[in-house]
Amino acid sequence: MSIPTVTIRDPISEIEETLLALQSAVLKHPVATQAILSALTAEGRRYSQTEEGHAKLLALSESDLLQKLWRVWEGTTLWSFNSDENSILPSAYIDALFMSANSKDLETVIERLASMEEPPGG
């Protein structure tokens, strides 16, 4: 008869796993991500023009949680996406590729990426 065991997972590892899955999805589909972000931003701007939306905008502008969420989004997406509805592929995404290509540690980075198992969500 086996005795059941309980494994307590580190909550940070679960959070990191979730953020890596989000990052993987976003970076695999940058055009779709940019389109979604642009559409949501445009919708939010239209809503903020209403009385109810403007009141919520003022409340959200003072929200510490929203500021933290924005930091997580920006860090997870590598600061690559913007709200410009005319942007198809964010220039920051291309900039990141060029900066990576110009890195003195390029070979090390490529080797690490090549040796990684498929990331969560991949």
Image: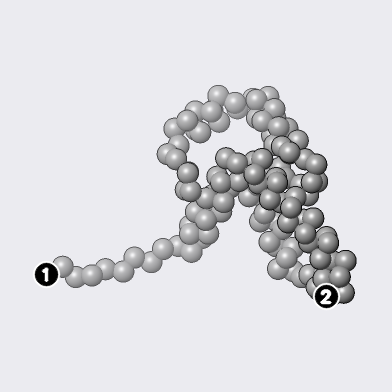
Q: Secondary structure at mark 1?
A: loop
User: Which residue lies at the image location 81% right of the left edge and 66% below the top edge?
Assistant: 47
The residue labelled by disc 1 is 1
Question: For residue 100, which numbered disc appears in the image?
Answer: none
Q: Amino acid at mark 1?
A: Met
Residue 101 in which image quadrant: top right
User: Which residue lies at the image location 75% right of the left edge and 50% below the top edge?
Assistant: 38
Q: Secondary structure at mark 2?
A: helix
Toward the viewer: 63 or 91?
Answer: 91
Residue 107 in which image quadrant: top right
What percent of the width, then of the height, locates residue 118?
44, 40
Mark 1 crowd level (few <14, some 14–19, many ≥20, 10 Å Cα): few
What percent of the width, then of the height, locates residue 93?
69, 36
Camera-side mark, 2 or 1: 2
- Gap between marks 2 and 1 measured at Cα: 62 Å
The residue labelled by disc 2 is 52
Q: Amino acid at mark 2?
A: Glu
User: Which residue lies at the image location 70% right of the left edge and 62% below the top edge?
Assistant: 68
What percent of the width, then of the height, locates residue 10?
45, 62
Q: Is residue 88 in sight in this rendering?
A: yes
Tell me if 107 is positioned left or right of 9 in this view: right
Toward the viewer: 110 or 28?
Answer: 28
